[in-house]
Each structure stands twice: as C-alpha cells, then as structure tokens.
Amino acid sequence: MRDFRSSLNKAGVWLRKFMRADEGNTAIVFALASVALMSAGGAGVDMARVVAAKNRMATALDAAALAVGGTSGLSSDALTTMAQQYFDANYRGSNLGTPDPVHVDVEGQRITLSVNGVVSTTLLQAAGVDSMNFTVTNQVLRGMSKLRVALVLDNTGSMADVDATGTSKMAALKTATHQLLTQLQGAAVNPGDVEVSIIPFAREVNVGTASKTATWLDWSDWDAANGTCSRRTYTSKSSCVSHGKTWTPASHDTWNGCVMDRDQDYDTMNTTPTAANVHTLFPAEQSPYCPATLVGLGNDWTALNNKVDAMSPNGNTNQTVGLAWGWQSLTEDVPLSAAALPPDTVQVIILLTDGMNTQNRWSTTQSSIDARTQLACDNIKAAHVQVYTVLVMAGDSDILRSCATDTNKYYALTTAGQIVTTFNAIGTELANLHLTL
C-alpha cells in the first residue's frame, strides 16, 4: 500500500511541476496525465481483486478455525497441519491471490490463526506497484461444555459370545471402552471438565460391599433368603417360621454387593431413597451372577480403566436396572451423590447391550421388562440427559431405538468389532467443543 501511495505522490509531483512550467506540449501533457489516471484507475481494479482474495481467504480460515477449535488433545504442530488442510480445501482463489502457510498460535483455550496473502497487480504495474500484501486473522475461544458420561455396559453371559472373526463381544467392549476413556480424558482441558461413571449390569447391579451400612438399602428380602433355621431342614425364613422354628439372618458381611430393581415405579426414577418410604430403598440381593462393582462419577482415569478390565460376562439381561443406576450416578443425592451440576454441563448415558431383556426382579417376560425400560428411558430424557443406545449382534430393537435421544444416537451393530468404531464415533461427538468465534 505504501508503494501505491508513493507512486501516486510521484505522479502528483510530476503533474504539479508541469502545471507550473511555462513550456510544454500536448504529448507531454497527455503522457503525464495518463500516469495519474492509470494509477488511480488501476488502484480501483487491483483493490477490488485484493478484497476478493482477502474475503475468500477469510472464509477458508474460518473453516480451519472451526476444525481446530472443535478438536482436542492435539499438539500445536498437529493443529497447524489440520488448519492447513482445511484452509487448502476451502480456498479456491489462487488465481486471485497466493497465501503463505497458515500460522497457528495456541495460548490456553485461545487459538489464533493467521495467513498472509499477496495479490499480483495488473494496471498498477504501470505505476511500479507489482503486488499488494495483506493479512487475515481469526481467533477461536475453546469453551468446552463440561461432560458427565455414564457408561451402562452389559456384563451378561452372552457377552462372552464371539463373532465370525473370533472376537468376543466382551473383549471388543473392553477395547472400545478403554479407547473412549482416552478420548474423554484428552477432551478435558482442566481437571473435572469431563467425568465418567461405569455401570456394569446383568439382572442386578453391584454397588459394592462397602455400602452394607448405607441407609438407602432394604435388607428385608436378603435377610429372608440368607440365614439359618434352628432346624436345618428349612433353608428359607418362610418355611422355617411356618414350622415354628427360629430364623437367624446371616451377617451382612457376607453380602456380595448386589441390588435389585426398586419397587415400581421407583425402579424407573431417580427419586432420592429415604427410610421414611421403604419403596424408595434399593433391595439387597445375593445373586451368584453379580457383575463387577460400579464406579461412580469421577475423573480417576486409572480407576475407570481398571474397572473395565475387571468386567466379566455372566447372568441375564435387565437393561432397566443398568439405566436406573446410570441415572443415579449423574444425580446429586444418595446413593452415589454426584457433585452439584456445574453450569453448561452436558449429561450423557451410553447404554450398550447385546440382547433383549430376559429377567428382572419380577418377571422373565420380555414385554413386561421392556415396559420398565421404556419408562426409565422416558424419565431420563425428560430430565435432559442425552441417551445413546448400542445393540450388538442382536438384530434390531424398537425399544432401544425409542430409548435413544434421537435415531442418530441408536446403533445396531452386526459384529463385535464394530463396538470399537462406534464408541470412537460417539467419543468424537462428545469431545467436540462449543466454539465462540
């Protein structure tokens, strides 16, 4: 721009000298006037080309900013490479102007992108101006919505089955979950930005034996089923007492940590349990197929990964109890007492199962159990929790499609290996950041 102004100034000096001179001729007048006129006219044409090139580069840089701003866990060099790829894919104005490489500067959650451009002049070359330079700058504030993610994972016996490639569903689930945890950990800019719970489920859920003194447990059924009679012939409280004998419940120290569905309709809700209403309490159960203990919401990534390794397939399928405890893990009150929900927090439940409901506390009829699952899903979504559902090697499921927040969050997989790619896709979606440009 300084070169352009200098040329115009020179033309103006020449013209003023000529106008003060007494001698001259028409050819000289025309020649000098042409310099000024061409400079002024050329400025308009070439400036229009600069504006066009700058606008196109700005649009391409916007696309690059959206890409790098929505990606976490990459180094500065990797972000620069990504920005350049998106810029190149969106800039189609090389016939107008030539850009330098995109420069990316990362400072905390602020990402600044810039690119220098140059446009070769046409008419202004007559005035000695061969090119015009400019810079386009863009800035992204990476403001990540906090994430709370409950992984509700099928640990039933059929998860030991293998697909045509010889890959077991449980092995694929472990690999996929480890990778998902890595994605979510990488998405956290600050500790606590992303928190995860893991809820292994079968017919029951395991809350851990450390909860044996919790006031939110109901021991009635457990005490009636686990104990000794003064006459050993009778192995249940009902038969023992009906024969006039004395029933002595077993020590709660022998409990394996399992709990059943709550009384209906609390089985489909996240109502705070209270001793004043026994129906809100969680019934203790001594299931021989008790899954691995759950892990409440947190960001201890080592503990979360260790829990994945501890999962083992056993027992029957009750999606409702898994969903109920996934929701409980996101809830502030007991039993799992999540911390108060920060502003701008997205709550998510990811349910993975490999089959249809087969058994809950009351029934082995699928339609009856499905009705409980549907109620739980409806209540969870009404609480503004996003729900993803993943069905593995079991055809299709209307109940799981309906359970998902929308059809794009329902996945019906035909192989075990697809669990890995599906969890990766979900993790990428969850890790996308909200951008303020």
Image (cartoon, rainbow, N blue to C red):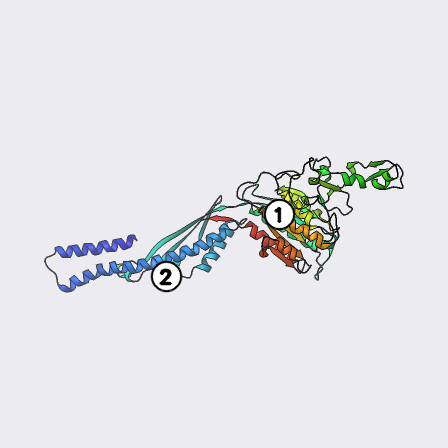
Q: Is residue 55 left or right of residue 285?
A: left
Q: Position of residue 196 (x, y in %)?
A: 62, 45
Q: Quadrant of residue 244?
A: top right
Crowdedness near tag 1: few (<14), some (14–19) or many (≥20) residues, C-alpha within 10 Å? some
Q: Quadrant of residue 416?
A: bottom right
The residue that label 1 is drawn on is 379
Q: Position of residue 37 (x, y in %)?
A: 22, 60
Element type where label 2 sits in the image: loop
Query: 144 above or below 35?
Result: above
Q: Is residue 121 left or right of residue 433?
A: left
The residue that label 2 is drawn on is 96
* Viewer-closest of 209 and 261: 261
Circle 1: residue type: Asn
Q: Nearer the viewer, mark 1 or mark 2?
A: 1
Assess whether mark 2 and mark 1 are in contact (beta carbons under 8 angstroms): no
Q: Position of residue 257 (x, y in %)?
A: 74, 41
Query: 29 above or below 297?
Result: below
* Viewer-closest of 199 and 6: 199
Element type where label 1 sits in the image: helix
